[in-house]
Image (tube, helix red, strand yellow):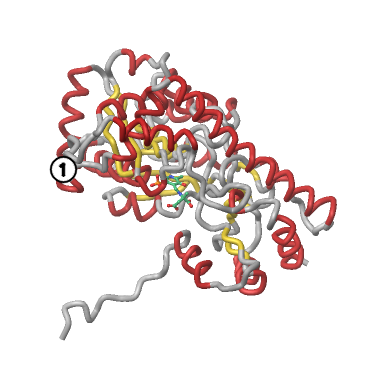
Amino acid sequence: ISAWATVPAGPPDPILGITEAFKADKDPRKINLGVGAYRDEHGKPYVLQTVKKAEELVLSQNPGKEYLGITGLPEFTARAALLAYGAESAPLQQGSVSVTQAISGTGALRIGGAFLARHYPHSKEIYVPAPTWGNHIPLFRDAGLDVKFYRYFNKSTVDLDFEGLKADLLAAPEGAIVLLHACAHNPTGIDPTPEQWAVISDIVKEKKLFPFFDMAYQGFASGNTARDAFALRHFVAQGHQVAVAQSFAKNMGLYGERTGAFSLTVSDPEEKARVDSQLKIIIRPMYSNPPAYGARIASAILGDPALYGQWETEVKGMADRIISMREKVYSLLTNDLKTPGEWGHIKSQIGMFSYTGLQTAQTKTLAQKAHVYMTADGRISMAGLNDGNVEYFAQSVDAAVR
Ligand SMILES: Cc1ncc(COP(=O)(O)O)c(CN[C@@](C)(CC(=O)O)C(=O)O)c1O
């Protein structure tokens, strides 16, 4: 009898499984609004011009195929940290940020989860928002943390449940870990205002919680990398110790190159050396060392003022196209189709996604009847919309809600 006779068939991934269903659909009208991968105005995957230039630059330097060190490409990790924390960051200036390359944002979160599970002395509980990116839950559980939730989304107002968020963080056990989406919250597209972030920072300090920022969309939310890092930089300026997971999948379009970084603020360079050594001890048995190509591209962009400027322009261009699609969908539903219900949240939300408020049954009808694919919680990746399919999308939603 096979050793795997008792292995059960597991469910498809709630996000990546949508793309599989979309690919199997042969209807020419089909639209994939599942996975959060940017598409241009023709619905095509988009390789940034800046990335193409950086690739030429990298290849012209004949980097070869040698192993990187366990924590990756040093110039990449230094530049990634500078992008996240900013030049004015005190810990960065004091050499008190431990940073390692990671296998994109997922890998950064996993290293962070493993490090916290092994070395954080106060709690193994991590409070994540309800709802959050689906993969956070199995990822932190598999890393050895105990996943709990704090209220984040108010279904009736389709807005931030700030009262619930405050109450849940105030009720959390002292010293618990709290996961915060730095910007462009996935799946709701709803971010706290700067004033609300200041209140959250005060509560985190009062309860001695440990803030773990997931910054997967820096620059992609507002088009401005500094503005999108406001929450993280405010917390650091307020004296919090933080952990940060960074991804260059979306803001540089390096999805398949798996380029990311994980960092922790520490008390001084001596502590940095101890923390660095423990990060290496976690990574070496996990995957030994990271892929080089994406890190060289990202480093070339972040390290060259001209490329950096061009990159910020391109990432703002992507953010702006998404914002124009938000406005178009809102106008079609509200002014043209007069679709029942309130649709302002589609316009006011920020980043890659819109949390439409469509019920699971409606998302299934949309997939089966209209060939419009989105996650079962009603999240749509706005980038999947363009002038060629946005009318059809709006008509399909209108039919599904009537
Ligand atoms: C909040 C958040 N954190 C981390 C990641 C990890 O991305 P990376 O490992 O590719 O850097 C994603 C990607 N979420 C996507 C865009 C894709 C996915 O689910 O993997 C999404 O569709 O939600 C994310 O939305």
Q: Residues within 10 Å of mark 1 (few under 14, many from 20)?
A: some
**In the foreground, 75 or 95:** 75
User: Whole-percent x and y of residue 210?
Assistant: 36, 33
The response on whether ligand 1 sits within 8 Å of label 1 is no
* Front-lying residue, 21 or 266: 21
Residue 151 in view of the camera: yes
Residue 134 in the figure: left or right of residue 57: right
Left or right of residue 246, residue 359 in this image: right
Residue placed under numbered mark 1 in the picture: 284
**Which of 153 and 231 lies nearest the eye of the viewer?**
231
Q: Residue furthest front?
A: 60
- For image coordinates 58% across by 64% down, the residue present is 373
Q: In the rendered view, would you say 330 is above or below 208?
A: below
Q: In the rendering, at what x and y percent does residue 159 appear? A: 64, 44
Residue sitting at x 33%, y 49%:
140
Q: Nearer the viewer, residue 169 or 60?
A: 60
Q: Which residue is drawn at 45% across and 40% down?
A: 216
Count of numbered badges drawn on the protein: 1
Q: Is residue 214 left or right of residue 155?
A: left
Residue 19 place in picture, x, y as percent? 49, 63
Q: Which amino acid does label 1 sit on?
A: Arg
Q: Quadrant of the C terminus?
A: bottom right
Q: Quadrant of residue 199?
A: top right
Residue shown at 55% from the left, 63% from the top: 376
Disc 1 secondary structure class: helix
Extreme-bottom residue of the structure: 1
The quadrant of the image that shows the N terminus is bottom left
Residue 59 relative to residue 215: left or right: left
